[in-house]
Image (tube, rainbow, N blue to C red):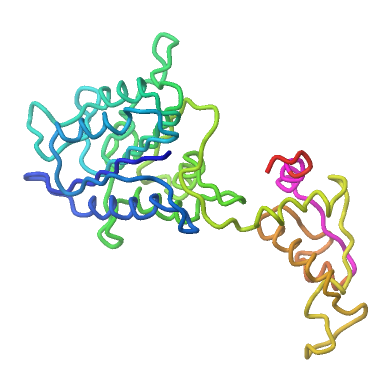
Amino acid sequence: MKKALIVGLNNYPGCKLAWCDNDAIAMKELIESNGDGSPNFEVIPITDSCTKSNLESAIRKLFADDADIALLYFSGHGADADGGYLCTTDFSENDYGVRMTDILEIVNNSRCKNKVIILDCCFAAKMGESVMLNNNSLLGDGVTIIAASQSWQTSGENSSIQHGIFTELLIQGLKGGAADIGGNITPASLYSFVDQSLGAWQQRPVFKTNISQFLPLRTIQPKVPKSILRKISTYFENPTDEFKLDPSYEYTNAPDVEHSVTEPYADVEHVNVFKELQLFESVGLVEPVGTDHMYFAAMENRSCKLTALGLHYWKLSKDRRF
């Protein structure tokens, strides 16, 4: 069971934001289903306005049971006072909203197996700022925090994209930019995608976690289907082997194609194998030997071999790990 509370607040008296509701709507639409349309998270959205009492109540309800993943996403104002706040739209000078330390206490005491907090607000890394205190972790088991900015930084919106800068990258990552070869998008891969996409002079995201194994936040159609990926250890019996190619593996090398052809002509079985090898190459698992392209490796009677990443998946295939 996966469930999520998705919050995007704009309607702050005297300091309105423009696109936080857009952030929340886009995040909800993405995580409530996987790339193949199958159900993913059950989502409760809160947009535009929310009181402190209602937000705190919703957070407690989110983390109240033993869900496989409970995800809190917040887009809105953040305050750096008193350990940090997620600001609610009924904030006052003496009470900005829900304290980050109070949220972390709720999360740390939760029975949910994986607790993920994603914050697109100013001073977002105030959440769990001191990861260790007296050699005791402030992050409970299964807790992951992805923050849009450092604890002293603001988080920006972009009117041209009508989203927060950080959330726009989250959206791209969840659509597939952060997916691994198997189509899985985890908190770690999502953070890595965002971190690499932001420049050195922009707000810097922060990743904190106390977890031994990530469950995917979303899955998409894998670039290489698992049924094909499993074959990598059959094409390469040993990890140092090279797979010998010849022109029969190239489907365009056929008499009915109007260009120069050479024997042996395209063979259906070889062509199907070559297409799968080219799939492996497209995701960095295989590389041609002695040339830059698989096409020329075939036409010039060369070969292909496993890359370092290919060796990793060869071992997984050999050990039947997927």
From which residue to which does the magenta span run? 301-316
Q: Position of residue 28 (x, y in %)?
A: 33, 51
The answer to if 230 sits in the magenta stretch is no
Residue 223 picture quarter:
bottom right
77 w.r.t. 180: above or below: above
Depth check: give the residue in front, 148 or 10.
10
At horizontal 85% and vertical 88% (from top left) the residue drawn is 255
Q: Is residue 120 left or right of residue 270?
A: left
Q: Position of residue 63 (x, y in %)?
A: 33, 30
Depth check: give the residue in front, 204 or 32.
32
Q: Is residue 165 left or right of residue 271?
A: left
At horizontal 83% and vertical 54% (from top left) the residue drawn is 235
- Please tell me how many numbered marks the rendered image carries: 0
Depth check: give the residue in front, 78 or 44.
44
Q: Position of residue 112 (x, y in %)?
A: 40, 28
At horizontal 35% and vertical 43% (from top left) the residue drawn is 203
Residue 108 picture quarter:
top left
Residue lying farthest to the top in this orientation: 134
Q: Position of residue 114 (x, y in %)?
A: 44, 31
Residue 55 picture quarter:
top left
The answer to if 303 sits in the magenta stretch is yes
279 w.r.t. 144: above or below: below
- The quadrant in which the N terminus is found is top left
Residue lying farthest to the right in this orientation: 263
148 w.r.t. 53: above or below: below
- The quadrant in which the C terminus is found is top right
